[in-house]
Image (cartoon, rainbow, N blue to C red):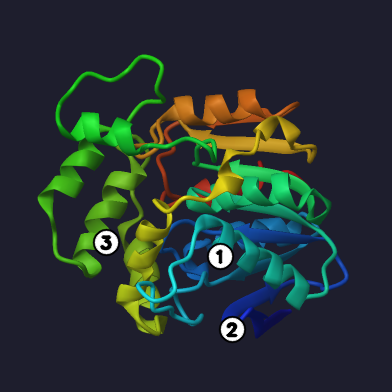
Amino acid sequence: MVHERYVPSGPLRIWTERIGDPGLPAVLMIMGSAAQSVSCPDALVGRLIERGVQVIRFDHRDTGRSSTVDFDAHPYTIGDLARDCLAVLDGYDLDAAHVAGTSLGGILAQWLAVHAPHRVRSLTVISSSPMGHDPGPVWARARAGEPADPDDLPPPTPAYLAHLAAGLPPGLESDMALFRVFNGPVRPFDEPAARAMLELALSRAVDPAAAAHHHRAVWLDEPGLLAPLSSITAPTSIVHGDQDPLYPLAHGEALAAAIPGAVLHVVPGMGHVMTSPGLPEEVADLIRL
């Protein structure tokens, strides 16, 4: 059973999709920066349905079929993106859901668990980093070739920094190059599946360029990110690949250490995305229900 609808978030319309029996507990999947709902693999959704839940995925503002924003006139923060997630729950009359977020979606999921704990039945953070961590100085030192501060979480890998430095023009081939890096060097990269997903994303975007606003939003001050992760009470699982080029494993380890009772699942060979055969199902089995 699949149901599509728009839900309001203030003046914006957020495109959503619910898969499965609406009478079952819900999993809210929150994808990463500039990522549409379609970046959540169908295989992952299908495995979750087999586990006895319904799944809700959605397009963030400025992605896919959701509303786009004039960012210069109306800048928004990570907190605003998190409140869009609450609007999705409200749109489906859900008091609470199991919440699973990847990358930036994992930071939004942390925000929800801290600031709206009654809405989060369980928390799963995938391929992400502690929400109060400021990567700016770390990235600047890495790009300048300066030694890392031993007290900092590690910067992205040289392969990812080299991709950024290449300055490829926006478009499908640039996205494919990024996903090859994100996949990591250990597990096979399912290039046809990745290309099909990225082509679908481009075809359904109201304004493909608007997704870049997320990269601006993450640098804006958001006081809510500074709240202690130790206040999280939801049962929590951290899922992190040991080949993540954007957030090396130490980010997942730090996150697990900061949340009381959190369980860390290290996925061998996994990078930053689920573009390897069998990996979406593997990750689905680790989502906390």
What is the three-letter code of the residue carrying label 1? Asp
Q: Are marks 2 and 3 in contact (CB under 8 Å)?
A: no
Can residue 167 be seen?
yes
The quarter holding residue 243 reads top left
Disc 2 to disc 3, C-alpha distance? 30 Å
Q: Which mark is residue 11?
A: 2
**Direction from residue 113 to residue 39 in the image, left or right:** left
92 horizontally vs 198: left or right: right
Question: Mark 3 — residue?
Answer: 175
Q: Looking at the picture, does residue 140 appear above or below residue 19?
A: above
| Type of the residue with mark 2 | Pro
Q: Nearer the viewer, mark 3 or mark 1?
A: 3
- Which one is earlier in the sequence, the residue at label 3 or at label 1? 1
- What residue lies at 75% left-to-right and 26% top-to-bottom? 261
Q: Nearer the viewer, mark 1 or mark 2?
A: 2
Residue wearing tag 1: 42
Tell me the residue at 36%/40% (across/down): 246
Q: Position of residue 100 (x, y in %)?
A: 64, 51
Gap in Å between the C-alphas at discs 1 and 2? 30 Å
Q: Nearer the viewer, mark 2 or mark 3?
A: 2
Q: CA distance from mark 3 to mark 1?
A: 20 Å
Task: Please tell me in which quadrant of the rendered image residue 130 appears.
Answer: top right
Residue drawn at x 77%, y 72% as measured from the top left: 90
The local crowd at label 1, few if under 14, some if 14 to 19, many if 20 or more residues have their Cα within 10 Å, is few
Which one is in front, 83 or 120?
Answer: 83
Circle nearer the N terminus (2, 3): 2
| Amino acid type indicated by mark 3 | Asp
Can the viewer see residue 278 in this picture?
no
Query: Mark 2: few, some, or many residues within 10 Å (few <14, many ≥20)?
Result: few
